[in-house]
Image: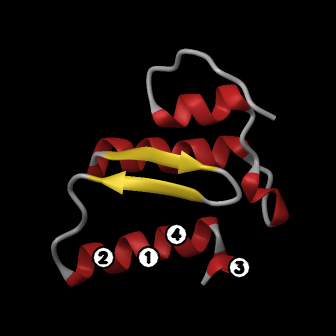
């Protein structure tokens, strides 16, 4: 499925396009949107590409071990089958 339209952010574009790659684990689009939206605000993440996998560009990733472990825990909670 290919859809083209305007969106204010990458996470809105995913929702508008009906992107559902997490369906092999969790099809809760609201949860996915909430996490990616939070990463957009906290880390300057933006959607680089979305197909079978989601690729994000991150402008300001965590700079210390605590921050990195926190994001790793969020990633694991969102997609444990990817670890």
* Mark 4 or mark 2, earlier in chain: 2
Quadrant position of residue 53: bottom right
* Mark 2 or mark 3, earlier in chain: 2
- Label pair 1/2, CB-CB below 8 angstroms: yes
Q: Which mark is residue 72?
A: 1
How far is mark 4 from mark 2, CA to CA? 10 Å
Residue 76 in the figure: left or right of residue 30: left
Residue at left offset 43%, top offset 54% = 56
- Label pair 2/3, CB-CB below 8 angstroms: no
At which x and y percent is residue 17?
Answer: 70, 30
Q: Which mark is residue 75?
A: 4
Residue at left offset 82%, top offset 56% = 23
- Residue tagged by mark 3? 81
Disc 4 crowd, CA 10 A, few/some/many (<14, 14-19, 20+): some
At which x and y percent is residue 10?
Answer: 48, 35
How far is mark 1 from mark 2, CA to CA? 6 Å
Residue 46 in the figure: left or right of residue 50: left
Height in image: 14 above or below 22?
Answer: above
Quadrant in which the C terminus is drawn: bottom right
Quadrant in which the N terminus is drawn: top right
How far is mark 3 from mark 4, CA to CA? 10 Å
Q: Secondary structure at mark 2?
A: helix
Q: Which mark is residue 68?
A: 2
Disc 2 crowd, CA 10 A, few/some/many (<14, 14-19, 20+): few
Q: Which mark is residue 38?
A: none
- Label pair 4/1, CB-CB below 8 angstroms: yes
Disc 3 crowd, CA 10 A, few/some/many (<14, 14-19, 20+): few
Residue 17 in the figure: left or right of residue 47: right
Tell which of 50 and 81 is nearer to you. Answer: 50
Q: Secondary structure at mark 3?
A: helix
Height in image: 21 above or below 76?
Answer: above
């Amino acid at each position: 499925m290919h859809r083209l339209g305007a969106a204010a952010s990458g996470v809105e574009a995913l929702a508008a396009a009906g992107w559902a790659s997490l369906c092999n684990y969790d099809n809760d689009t609201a949860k996915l949107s909430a996490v990616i939206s939070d990463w957009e605000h906290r880390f300057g993440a933006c959607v680089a590409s979305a197909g079978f996998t989601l690729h994000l560009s991150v402008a300001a990733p965590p700079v210390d071990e605590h921050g990195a472990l926190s994001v790793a825990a969020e990633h694991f909670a969102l997609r444990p089958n990817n670890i």
